[in-house]
Image (spheres, rainbow, N blue to C red):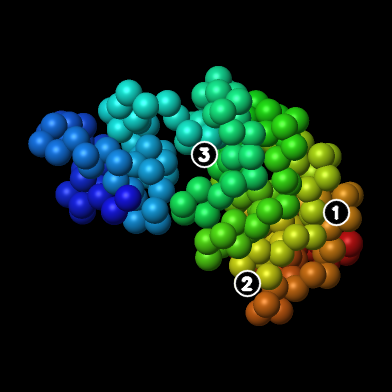
Amino acid sequence: MSTAPDTLLTAIRERDSSSVRAILDADSSLLASTGPGGESLVLYARYVSAIDLIAMLQHTRALDAHEAAALGDVDALRNALAADADVASRHSNDGWTPLHLAAFFGHDAIADVLIARGAPLDLLSTNSTRNTALHAAIAGATNAALVARLVNAGANVRARGEAGITPLHLAASRGDAAICELLIAHGADVTARMDDDTTAAQLASTRGFVDLSSRLTLN
């Protein structure tokens, strides 16, 4: 599949449904083209919050597992898993597993299905972010219940992503004391340093979360 022309991607990004429809009416083969990272147009639309365009871009085909995970469509996910159970551990063209996408967008029910089906908790994304689903959960919607679900299921709280970032660094950078405490209670290392030597406490301080920085330093 080739990358969609800039005019189509721009129309999707600008949520211009009339232009998207006109472009696709002129060349329906573009429905099979991709976004800049190799992701389907449905995923691209989700990434840029063009939710109203999803049905048009999906057209008549079923959602795949990655799309279903990103959109929170449990029935579509179950259908995709029934057709190919191994897709739970497969990366999308732009490098995410279904669990990464469910985690980032905060879809509890999707994560529950994937975890129950044995989706690997600690696979790294194959893109430049190189993170786990737990990283994604904290970096994205930060659904606290979903973060706890991953941690309680055994996700590695000390996993390192790109630049050596840990889930605790991410939670600290967002000033989320509750998630920091959850991670520490499950073994997160408060002394862990990123590749540039930054600790979670330092990151919290830099972002203006002084009280949290002090609490992390005391730990």
Position of 183 compared to 165: left or right?
right
Say which of marks 1 and 3 sits in front. Answer: 3
Query: Of tags 2 and 3, which is closer to the observer?
Result: 3
Q: In which quarter of the image is residue 198?
A: bottom right
The residue beneath circle 1 is 184
Count of numbered labels shown in the rendering = 3
Q: Residue, x 53% and y 65% (percent of image)?
A: 128
Residue 180 in view in this figure: yes
Mark 2 Cα shell of 10 Å, populated few (<14), some (14-19), many (≥20)? some
In this view, the residue farthest toward the front is 83
Left or right of residue 68: residue 25? left
**Mark sitting earlier along the chain (2/3):** 3
Report the residue at 68% width, 34% height from top.
114
Label 2: which residue? Answer: 163
Q: Residues within 10 Å of mark 1 (few under 14, many from 20)?
A: some
In percent of width and height, residue 11 lies at 21, 43
Q: Distance between the residues labelled 2 and 3?
A: 26 Å
Q: Give the x, y percent position of residue 219.
A: 89, 62
Judging by the rendered image, the residue that carries numbered circle 3 is: 66
